[in-house]
Every structure is written in C-alpha cells, then in structure tokens.
Image: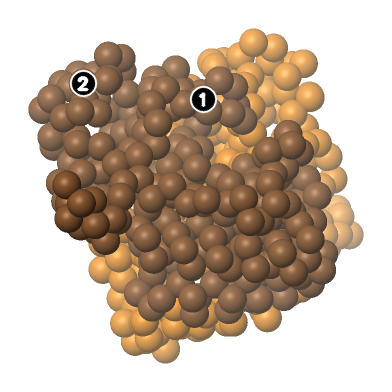
Chain colours: A brown, B orange
Amino acid sequence: MKVLALDTSTMWGIIGISDDGVPLAEIGIKSYSPYSKILMEGIDFLLRQVGLKIDDIEGVGVGIGPGSFTGLRVGISTIIGIAYAKGLLVAPIPSLEAIAMNLTPTNNLICPIIDAKKKEIFSGLFRYKNEEKLYRIEEERSWKPSELAEKIKDKVLFTGSGITKYGQFFKETLNEKAAFVSKRFWFPRGSILAIMAERMIQLGEGVKPHLIKPIYGRASDAELSLNGNKE
Amino acid sequence: MKVLALDTSTMWGIIGISDDGVPLAEIGIKSYSPYSKILMEGIDFLLRQVGLKIDDIEGVGVGIGPGSFTGLRVGISTIIGIAYAKGLLVAPIPSLEAIAMNLTPTNNLICPIIDAKKKEIFSGLFRYKNEEKLYRIEEERSWKPSELAEKIKDKVLFTGSGITKYGQFFKETLNEKAAFVSKRFWFPRGSILAIMAERMIQLGEGVKPHLIKPIYGRASDAELSLNGNKE
C-alpha cells in the first residue's frame, strides 16, 4: 500500500512515502521559508523521483501535533485537500510519537521534548510495546517541565530539540534516571512517518479528512485572551 | 560548519546537509532512475529550501561503500567534482557505518547487511564506543554469510535491507545471539551522514578529493575474469 505522509508541527518539516512498510522516499527540511511553499514542491519532487503520480497514492497521513498553530494548519490543510480530492483516508499521527519512533526499541521510557515557548514544552511519555508500537504513558500536550518531571519514576531517554533548552533542567531534577540521545535522533523522519501512517490505516485507524483535528497542545493566545476577558 | 554529504552505494540514495552537528535538510530516495539525474536535482532542491548556495558549503562527505560499482562511482564523482571546484576537503564515510548509526547506542554488536549478489553480503561488525562513534570489529567488505557468522561470538543486532534475504540464515545459525531491527531502521539517513562527515573533517580525517577511493568490497567481474584468464 503506497502511503504519503507529512508533518509540519515543528521547525523540522518532513515528507515521506512508503510502500508495504518499506521506505520509498523522504525529505526533511529545517524550515526557513513557509511550509505552504515547501510542501507542494517537496511532494512533487519525491513522487517524480520514485516514478509515482499522486493517483498512485492509496492512503495519507499527517502529524497532528502538538505543535505551532500555523505550521500544523498548513500541513493538515494540505493533506486534507489531497485526501478529499482523491477520496482517501487520513492517518492522524501523534507528532511526538514520530520523534520517539527514531529510537530503537528499549526498556526505558521515551520522552520527546520540543520547546513550546512561554516556559513550557510539548511532550508526552511513551514506552515500546514491541518493535512497531509505542504505548502512551502520559498524554502529548504542553507541560511545565517541573510538572512532567514529577510523572517520571523510572529510567527515561529524552529526545527532541527541546533538550537544548531543557536538558540541563531534567538532568538536575531526575539525576541518574535521565539519559539523552544525541542530536542526530532529535528530528522525525519522513519514511518512518509514512510507515506509521500505513500501519494506522491498516489497523482501521484512518479517518475521513474532515475528522482530522490538530492537537495544539494548549489554547491559542486569542482564546486565552478571550477567556480572560470573560472572567 | 556547513557540510553536504551523499551516499549512493545502495539502492537507497541519500543527500544531507548539517550545520554544527544539527540537521538542516535531507533526502532519501529508493532509486529507480539513475543517480546521475537525482543527485544534482536533489542537492539543488535542498540548498534552495534552506536558503543556502553551494558557496556556503564548507566541507563535503561521501559514502565510500562497499557497494555497487556504478552507484558508488556516480556519487563519489559528484562529490569530488564539487570539492575540487570549491577547494574543499572530503570526508570518506564507510557506508555501512552510516546505516549502523541509525540505531541508538546499545551494548550489543551491530551488523548491517546488504545483499551483494553472488550469494554474498556487504557487511561489517561495529560496536558503539560512545554516543557519537562506532568502532570497527570486522572490516566492511563482501562476506559469505557463513564466514561472517563464525566471527560473531556475542549478542548482535542486525540491520539493513539484506535481512530480507539473509535474516533467516542468521537466525538459524546464531539462534538467541541474533536480533533484528525493523525495516524503518534499515536505510541510512541524509542528515546523519552529513553529521558524520562534519565530525570526520573536524577530527582531521577529511582528505583532498583525488585521494577518495571507493571500497568496492570485492573485485569487479572484469577483474575476476582478467585474473581467471591469467591463471
């Protein structure tokens, strides 16, 4: 089954294509220009290189966050557009789980962290069930670092670009419980995302495009301000 | 330091750009059309997306095999051309080590395997020294699977696309000593290759372009036939 997937929840945007669990093509780009420009050019480039047309794609997937408002909306809108036009199901992929899936199976907890600004991190806690599947210990959302640290009772492997800013805090707070993977594992991989999407669709977890909802991880400034005014 | 690296030793071609150990951009493509076409278009695409020009690149790296004759030659020639034109040093990266670097640090041996045809595999044995560095236990070259199996006395984690054809053999031969990672880890990653190249250049392991030599892993058919005729 040929699957196209993308994730634009962070500053590292990815596109991937897989076929029956095998990587066909992938792109990863630290985004300087807006994703709206990169995405279509990137999808077109990848399809062309592997000799496929958009009509050959049988399912799609998208990283649903948590992550930045604009980035998420651009990625999700693009995939929804393709899925709607082609009548395809969409796999809603937790973006932090895609980062965690870069790490080879381990008995430790896995904790991807991304800087969410405002002294918070986008994070969640996972553990490998088997080679192919992580299960969720703590929900993916924005956390105060200290609040997340209190949930961690076991050895944990941190990954993700949030280590730059928050690694020191977790090292001091969790001591020998905390380990950190090096930078080359911090960013999700297009081909892994596509393989995750394929598996979700096969498990019946694909949904119609209009049902895809981003996890923003917290309320927007506009919402916070609106609620503040109500109170 | 901005580094561009590529590897065309197998059917999964990669291009990556990193800057001070952080991924900037990557492409991975299962090659159907010749690499000579993909490479320049891919390099140009990646540089454009991250707002760099070829003049901004301060070092280059290339996977030197072992691998297919034609694939290796195209990739190495391209990088040598760029390095010569820009006066840059080239990091010669062992291609199988780039595959092994996909796996997060483990105490086990790591054994990447690629089908080398003629009932042989391109392989080598590695062990992590630390997060950033693998050390070589057995040389990267073409092996008869049984000859390699005899060298393995310890728990070993296999990776690489050769598992499809030879996984069963190693499982039966090595029993509980052998473990296998799933397909999403089998193919090298552009950004990891670039980070490896950067580190080599910083360690003084970069060389002038004319000194880059591919590891073909075994003699070519032409050479074998020539030697055969001599005997």
When the figure is inspected, residue B230 is found, relative to residue A45, above or below; the finding is above
- Label 1 crowd bin: few (<14), some (14–19), many (20+), radius 10 Å: few
Q: Residue at x 52, y 51 (%)?
A: A213
Q: Residue at x 39, y 66 (%)?
A: A70
Q: Is residue B130 left or right of residue B117?
A: left
Q: Point out which mark residue A171 bears.
A: none
Q: How far across and down, in percent of the image, does residue A64 sit?
A: 50, 50
Q: Point out which mark residue A150 bears.
A: 2
When the figure is inspected, residue B211 is found, relative to residue B114, above or below; the finding is below
Residue under numbered circle 1: A135
Please state which amino acid type lies under the numbered disc 1.
Answer: Tyr
Q: How far across and down, in percent of the image, does residue B10 sit?
A: 67, 57
Marks 2 and 1: CB-CB under 8 Å? Answer: no
Q: Nearer the viewer, residue A55 or B209?
A: A55
Q: Residue at x 55, y 45 (%)?
A: A93
- Label 2 crowd bin: few (<14), some (14–19), many (20+), radius 10 Å: few
Q: Is residue A36 left or right of residue A194?
A: left
Q: Nearer the viewer, residue A84 or B201?
A: A84
Q: Is residue A226 left or right of residue A97?
A: left
Q: Mark 2 or mark 1, which has the lower sequence index?
A: 1
Considering the image in quadrants, where does the N terminus of chain B appear? bottom left
Q: In the rendered image, which quarter is residue A96 located in?
A: top left
When the figure is inspected, residue B76 is found, relative to residue B219, above or below; the finding is below
Q: Nearer the viewer, residue A225 or B23?
A: A225
Q: How far across and down, in percent of the image, does residue B19 sit?
A: 30, 65
Q: Is residue B169 visible?
A: yes
Marks 2 and 1, how far apart in space?
19 Å
Q: How far across and down, in percent of the image, does residue B138 sit?
A: 53, 34
Subunit that carries the residue with mark 2: A
Tell me the SS state at disc 1. Answer: strand
